[in-house]
Image (spheres, rainbow, N blue to C red):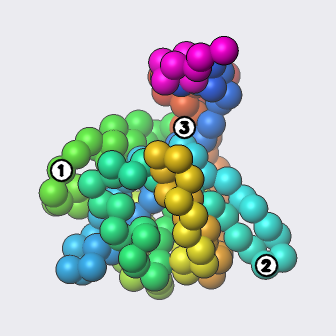
Amino acid sequence: MDISKDMFRRVLGNFATGVTVVTGIMPEKRPVGVTASAFTSISVEPPLVSVCFDKSTQSLDAFVKGTHFTVNVLSNMQTEQSRHFARRADDKFDGMDHQIGENGCPVLPESLAVVQCAREAIYDVGDHMLVIGRVERLESAQSGEPLIHFRGEYRQLD
């Protein structure tokens, strides 16, 4: 069976995912962020997570050459931030409210969770780079609902 890119995306789009903005620092010290739904936990001991980045990602060097990154798990009130960081732009943080976390990477306020990581490993897989991070710091909101991506659209829990 030939599996086209469109079929692959359409079928796997039936798997609902949370939405994150992964932030890092480019080699020239510029902060960057990219919207990603390919995020998951890998291990509790040691605490490890993974994020997959398309090889065409404009800011890929921040994640494959940088030593740290942060995963901001978005709430259903952050649809615009998700769209903003999904676009190509040279300075996505221009005018964007954020703080700098302990690992030096941007943190978006009002995220449901913030996972600050040190890069542990990188794997070249197909058209993506799989980046493994060792969790160094965690934060979690006391309330709020997740932003969900399902069948190519943003959704909310009912």
Q: Is residue 4 left or right of residue 82?
A: right
- To which residue does mark 1 refer? 89
Where the C terminus falls, by quadrant? top right
The disc label shown at residue 147, or none? 3
Q: CA distance from mark 1 to mark 3?
A: 23 Å
Residue 7 falls within the magenta-colored stretch: yes
What amino acid type should be assigned to the residue bearing mark 2? Pro
Q: CA distance from mark 1 to mark 2?
A: 35 Å
Q: Judge by depth and name the residue closer to the eye, 76 or 24.
A: 24
Dot 1 or dot 3, earlier in sequence = 1
Q: CA distance from mark 2 to mark 3?
A: 27 Å
Where the N terminus falls, by quadrant? top right
What amino acid type should be assigned to the residue bearing mark 3? Leu
Q: Judge by depth and name the residue closer to the eye, 67 or 8.
A: 8
Q: Residues within 10 Å of mark 2 (few under 14, many from 20)?
A: few
Q: Judge by depth and name the residue closer to the eye, 87 or 139.
A: 87
Q: Residues within 10 Å of mark 1 (few under 14, many from 20)?
A: few
Quarter where residue 147 is shown:
top right
Q: Judge by depth and name the residue closer to the eye, 24 or 120.
A: 120
Residue 65 seen = yes
The disc label shown at residue 46, or none? 2
Task: Determine the secondary structure under disc 3.
Answer: loop
